[in-house]
Image (cartoon, rainbow, N blue to C red):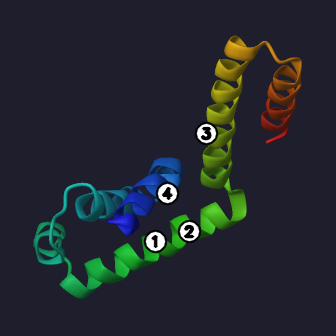
Amino acid sequence: MEKIVEQGLLYDFYGELLTAHQRQVYEDVVFHDMSLGEIAEEQGISRQGVHDLVKRCDRILAGYEEKLGLMQKFNQTKKMVAEIRELAEAYRVSKDGSLVERIEQISDEIGRL
């Protein structure tokens, strides 16, 4: 299950960089849960060809993430936003000024991403 989630996220970030044919086949496998045989018949290629294409797309998308790191930055930002929310709630309860300083620090970190 983790692999499918990762494939979906990578596709969300970098899928538009694939060719139309690559996108179609990849979407059929990852999002439409079609079998390799079904896709092969639909696309007029061999089952092995579909398998190889999906593996190639996985490598391409992982390569984009390795070079650009958008998914990593997104996940890091999500964690920081969650921490800001927790600190803001704690501030509402305690009125502790150091919490505001930490919120400002995290905001600055997000700005540098």
Q: Which mark lies nearer to you, 4 or 3?
A: 3
Whole-angstrom CA distance, mark 1 to mark 4, is: 9 Å
Label 4 to label 3: alpha-carbon separation = 16 Å
Q: Amino acid at mark 3?
A: Lys
- Dot 3 or dot 1: first in sequence order is 1
Spatial distance from mark 3 to mark 2, Cα to Cα?
A: 20 Å
Is disc 4 placed on a helix, strand or loop?
Answer: helix
What crowding class fits label 3: few (fewer than 14 Cα within 10 Å), some (14-19), or many (20 or more)? few
Q: How many marks?
A: 4
- Residue 100, horizontal then vertical, whole percent: 83, 20
Q: In the drawing, does residue 82 fall left or right of residue 49?
A: right
Horizontally, residue 93 falls left or right of residue 105, namely left
Real-space Cα separation, disc 2 to disc 4, in angstroms: 7 Å
Amino acid marked by disc 4: Leu
Q: Amino acid at mark 1?
A: Asp
- The residue at which mark 2 appears reads as 62
Per the image, the residue denoted by label 1 is 58
Q: Disc 3 designates what residue?
A: 78
| Nearer the observer, 87 or 73 | 87
Give the mark nearest the N terminus, 4 or 3.
4
Query: In which quadrant of the rendered view does residue 56 lie?
Result: bottom left
- Which residue: 46% across, 48% down? 12
Residue at left offset 19%, top offset 62%: 33
Q: Earlier in the sequence, mark 1 or mark 4?
A: 4
Could you say which disc has been placed on residue 10 in the image?
4
User: Is there CB contact under 8 Å for labels 2 and 4?
Assistant: yes
Marks 1/2 in contact by CB < 8 Å: the verdict is yes
